[in-house]
Amino acid sequence: MATQEEIARFGAVLGEVHRLLRRRTVARADREPLPEAQVEVLLLVRGAPGISGKEAARRLGTAPNTVSTLVRDLTDAGLLARDRDPADRRVVRLRITEAARERMAHYEIHRAALLAGALAELDPPVRAAILAAAPHLDALRDALAGPARPEGSGPAAGTAGNPLAVAPPGTA
């Protein structure tokens, strides 16, 4: 079983890799970055075209009015389209626009090139181990995306992902 220190280090490294990859890819693509919350909405809508704003809020775990603001901003930027549901005109269905599709594809090309360059600098066994971990990281993502665990379950409940949280006495 992994120690708390190993788990904390793993989480910190994942976060830093994500931040570096995002910053460097945006710089390489020579574009103004979108706020991370807007990127989350675009990725969700790309994966679930026709999703309602209410369902998007539920899946993102955020308030409907927050998603409404994000949708408005993305619509104003020409990256998201809102269509009324023909069966229920009160419901708005979301889809990404061609401009969003192109922007996301452009970003993904730059991200892949950046990763390829960084991986090429590593020793072959390290590179192979990192690439071989992809299916296991998929499994971790799926476990994290599963149903939320109720507060109070598991070690240091309520502190996971919060680097400022204090572990309960006797767990550190």
Image: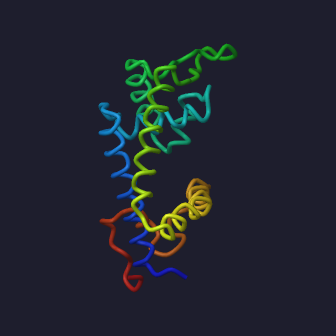
Q: Residue furthest bottom?
A: 170
- The figure's colour scheme reads rainbow
- Which residue occupies 46% across, 37% down? 109
Q: Residue furthest right?
A: 87
Q: Is residue 83 above or below residue 132?
A: above
In the displayed structure image, the side of residue 21 where residue 157 appears, left or right: right
Quadrant including the N terminus: bottom right
Front-most of 61 and 120? 120
Looking at the rendered structure, the number of numbered marks drawn on it comes to 0
| Picture coordinates of residue 115, whole percent (x, y) | 43, 51
- Which residue occupies 35% across, 58% down? 16
- Which residue occupies 50% across, 42% down? 60
Front-most of 82 and 116? 116
| Picture coordinates of residue 67, whole percent (x, y) | 45, 32
| Picture coordinates of residue 161, whole percent (x, y) | 41, 62
Task: Answer with the quarter of the image where residue 48 lies.
Answer: top right
Quadrant including the C terminus: bottom left
In the displayed structure image, the side of residue 115 where residue 142 appears, left or right: right
| Picture coordinates of residue 156, whole percent (x, y) | 44, 73
Q: Is residue 14 above or below residue 117?
A: below
- Which residue occupies 41% across, 22% down? 72
